[in-house]
Amino acid sequence: MEGKTKLVAGLEAKAAELGFAAFGIAPAAAAPKSGERLRAWIDSGAHGDMIWMAETAERRSAPAALWPEVRSVISLGMSYAPATDPMALADRPDIGRISVYAQGADYHDIVKKALKALARWLVDEAAADGAAADLKVFVDTAPVMEKPLAEAAGIGWQGKHTNLVSRREGSWLFLGAIYTTLELAPGEAHAMRCGNCTRCLDVCPTDAFPAPFQLDARRCISYLTIEHKGPIPEAFRAAIGNRIYGCDDCLAVCPWNRFADAARANRAFLPRAELAAPALADLLQLDDAAFRKVFAGSPIKRIGRNRMVRNAAIAAGNSGRPELVPPLEALVADEDEVVAEAAHWALRQLGSGA
């Protein structure tokens, strides 16, 4: 155990060197109830259009279900703590609000590169001690329950908004995981420290939390603007306001964010000028080529031009800005039916009668 403890200490130091702000280790079987909770959530239909959640539920239920040889899970978090108030643009109807996490470089690329470097270090160090280390690295897109595993590893806890909360980094962590065949000395699972606070639940514009620790994705603005492909239900359009990609409200109001320090955030996640406060008028005029150019290297690129313009049209309809009528009128004949419908709705909201 002494050798393993030394290896873990070196691993944690290397993780910090590579830009990770949070580190923890859990046994592969440390979150046994997460699979059961996932299946109940899917059975309720709360996952909406995210069919891939249902299709990968079995593999996602436990690390060993994905990779039977795994013995330890190394959980890591990279900070993207913002330097400014994420809700500061709420009163700027001419501007589209983009979630903090998507204003800089694509976290998939940044986190995975660091995970691979850490994995190579671990393989070499284990080999020097005469041990063979097989491992796999995961960031977000794989069927991995990052948040329950991070809680089990001691990084933080899943708050009432279902996201991970760290005592040191608040709500602003990108999570990654390394599965390994090594039996590494684990940390202690983190206790829930939300107390009686319900700020994250109370602030939600669409009442997406039926109860603490439960999320109905079908009502969540992040889901509606990112994952949902069809027309956004009219019942939620006004509440979306000027949000065009994601929503930070439940994260931003968490009291634990007072400990988060933007100086610890990875500089790759600093906001790009064109993504920090994009004008709705510009977004409404994007064609596919322009969309790809503007959002190159951003996680936003995966939703494609049509969903982004749909979102911008909804925000324009909420804006009360008559100068947005011309670009909206140009969209009523858009080849994409969802975009055209959103433009028609927005024009009606602006009193154009289209």
Image (cartoon, rainbow, N blue to C red):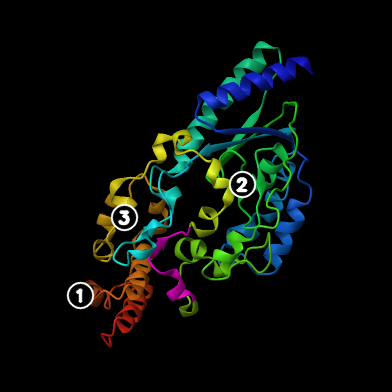
For the residue labelled by badge 3, is the local secondary structure a helix, a strand or a loop?
loop
Q: Quadrant of residue 24?
A: top right
| 2 or 1: mark nearer the eye | 2
Q: Looking at the image, is 120 positioned above or below residue 240?
A: above
Label 3 – label 2 distance at C-alpha: 26 Å
For the residue labelled by badge 2, is the local secondary structure a helix, a strand or a loop?
strand
Q: On the image, numbered disc 2 is attached to which residue?
A: 165
> What amino acid type should be assigned to the residue bearing mark 3?
Ala
Query: Which one is earlier in the sequence, the residue at label 3 or at label 2?
Result: 2
Q: Looking at the image, is 169 positioned above or below residue 119?
A: below
| Left or right of 178, for residue 203 | left
The reply to whether residue 54 is visible in this rendering is yes
From the top left corner, tell me how far across and down residue 106 is, in percent. Answer: 42, 44
Query: Magenta stretch?
Result: 236-247
From the top left corner, tell me how far across and down residue 345 is, in percent. Answer: 35, 81
> What amino acid type should be assigned to the residue bearing mark 1?
Pro
Q: Which of the image's four quarters has the N terminus?
A: top right
Residue 230 lies in the magenta stretch: no
Identified at 50% across, 26% down, the residue is: 18
Label 1 – label 3 distance at C-alpha: 21 Å
Give the numbered dot on residue 277: 3
The residue lying toward the viewer, choosing from 211 and 27, is 211
Label 2 – label 1 distance at C-alpha: 43 Å
Identified at 65% across, 38% down, the residue is: 155
Give the numbered dot on residue 229: none
The residue lying toward the viewer, choosing from 76 and 87, is 87
Does the CB distance between marks 1 and 3 fall below 8 Å? no
Give the numbered dot on residue 326: 1
Q: How many marks?
A: 3
